[in-house]
Image (cartoon, rainbow, N blue to C red):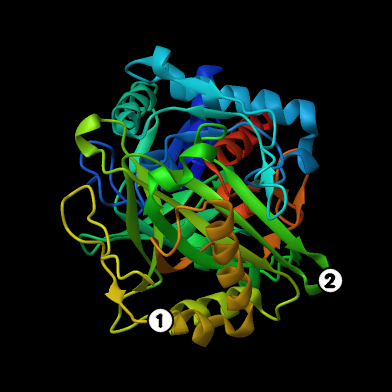
């Protein structure tokens, strides 16, 4: 009987486990996570726990292989879309009102955008953020009913690839754990990327360096963007500067009942966003990330960590608004955790002249959306930590040196719910064949 251990109860690990139990896998499946099950997990804890960060706070599933990571490089376009369908079907399957899951598919780039930005148009399945916690409970209960064992509030601090051991420590009591595996699925999220980096260094795994991805979370009243939102709800503006090795994009757009969330990663604060569907949460706001990708930075992971620290004031992230807008309130009614500053200097202090690209991006949005003016604010920073990506076997995402260890999700540079879930599903399919 095969013993599968999954590190991380995020979208990648959960979809992998689901694929296994759906197909009569007769081995033992153990999932270890630092966070909590969906019944005990607080709504504000968006970083760890069942369904990870994205599956707990973002109700949009992108449906295109060019968004969120390059799954198609491993298995091709057709197979990627098939895997996406399986992930989307799981969200519908455990949804309390599956008929409300709808797909938007804008097809034509509007002329008013073209002089200033490119606009990526792609299908998006809208699950509804308000339903995610109920989906999580239904999904969790199904896996438990199928014999999946969850170990919560336990941080994995070491993995012995040679002897197939996962070593952890409880976060609530003085208890050390050891789990042996025949197959390991390593699916840590953002909060575990430093551990993934440590493993790569400890075992001298061949890796593919990744670029820096850093920027700000932009916020403004929704009516300024309504003309574009009517065409593409989750719009993605972008521009490239190939000679400089720099590209920028807006991403993770939240509208109408849109809230900025402070994330605590590695002891530092960065920002993300989410949206509610329930009308009682409507605040008429839009927020989205403006993320800059910078290539050819020496030690990009360390560079990004240092840049984030430089944007902190008294241990908090920073907020700037040229029109002196105040930071928004969270869904819990408190103000977003941030330190208000009088200028954009923290961005320049942290990333130097690269900040010019972000500032120009915002200035051109003021031209494209004429009512916007200075009626906006930015939370600094938003960051996507991409550790060096380990080289894997394309058929099953296993490490080239350790074929019974499979990397998925953020650990393999996935940057979205659909891609992460698809990677987990792909690994499970291959395990079922063995």
Residue 355 - label: none
Quarter occupied by residue 258? top left
Residue occupying the far left of the picture: 333
Mark 1 vs 2: CB contact within 8 A = no
> Can see residue 178?
yes
| Residue bearing mark 2 | 243
Q: Quadrant of the C terminus?
A: top right
> Can see residue 434?
no
Secondary structure at badge 2 equals helix
* Relative image position of residue 223 (x, y in whole percent): 40, 43
* Relative image position of residue 93 (x, y in whole percent): 43, 17
Tell me which label, 1 or 2, sits earlier in the chain.
2
* Relative image position of residue 96 (x, y in whole percent): 32, 17
Question: Please, is residue 274 above or below residue 358 in the view?
Answer: above
At a point 45% along the width and 52% down the height, the residue shown is 371
At a point 36% along the width and 61% down the height, the residue shown is 263
Q: Nearer the viewer, residue 5 or 359?
A: 359
| Residue bearing mark 1 | 343
């Amino acid at each position: 009987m095969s013993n599968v251990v999954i590190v991380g109860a995020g979208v990648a690990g959960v979809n992998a486990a689901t694929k296994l139990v759906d197909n009569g896998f007769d081995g033992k499946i153990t999932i270890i996570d630092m966070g909590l099950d969906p019944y005990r997990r607080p709504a504000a804890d968006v970083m760890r726990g069942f369904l990870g960060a994205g599956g707990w706070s973002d109700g949009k599933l992108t449906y295109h292989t060019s968004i969120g990571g390059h799954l198609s490089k491993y298995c091709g376009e057709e197979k990627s879309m098939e895997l996406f369908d399986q992930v989307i079907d799981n969200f519908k399957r455990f949804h309390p009102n599956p008929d409300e899951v709808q797909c938007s598919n804008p097809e034509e780039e509007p002329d008013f955008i073209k002089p200033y930005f490119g606009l990526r148009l792609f299908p998006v399945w809208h699950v509804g953020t308000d339903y995610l916690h109920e989906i999580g409970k239904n999904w969790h209960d199904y896996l438990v009913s199928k014999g999946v064992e969850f170990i919560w509030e336990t941080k994995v601090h070491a993995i012995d690839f040679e002897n197939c051991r996962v070593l952890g420590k409880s976060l609530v009591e003085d208890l050390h754990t050891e789990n042996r595996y025949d197959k390991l699925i390593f699916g840590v999220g953002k909060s575990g990327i430093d551990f993934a980096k440590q493993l790569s260094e400890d075992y001298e795994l061949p890796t593919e360096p990744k670029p820096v991805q850093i920027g700000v979370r932009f916020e403004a009243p929704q009516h300024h963007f309504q003309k574009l939102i009517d065409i593409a709800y989750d719009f993605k503006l972008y521009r490239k500067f190939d000679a400089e090795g720099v590209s920028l994009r807006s991403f993770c757009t939240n509208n109408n009942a849109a809230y900025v969330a402070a994330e605590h990663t590695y002891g530092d604060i960065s920002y993300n966003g989410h949206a509610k569907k329930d009308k009682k949460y409507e605040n008429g706001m839009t927020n989205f990330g403006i993320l800059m990708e910078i290539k050819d930075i020496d030690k990009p992971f360390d560079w990004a960590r240092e840049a984030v620290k430089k944007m902190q004031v008294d241990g908090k992230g920073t907020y700037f608004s040229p029109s002196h807008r105040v930071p928004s309130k969270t869904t819990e009614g408190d103000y977003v955790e941030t330190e208000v500053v009088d200028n954009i200097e923290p961005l320049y202090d942290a990333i130097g002249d690269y900040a010019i690209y972000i500032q120009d991006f915002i200035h051109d949005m003021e031209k494209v959306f004429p009512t916007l003016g200075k009626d906006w604010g930015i939370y600094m920073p938003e960051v996507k930590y991409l550790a060096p990506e380990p080289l894997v076997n394309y058929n099953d995402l296993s490490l080239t040196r350790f074929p019974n260890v499979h990397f998925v999700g953020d650990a393999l540079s996935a940057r979205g719910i659909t891609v992460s879930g698809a990677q987990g599903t792909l690994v499970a399919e291959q395990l079922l064949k063995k």
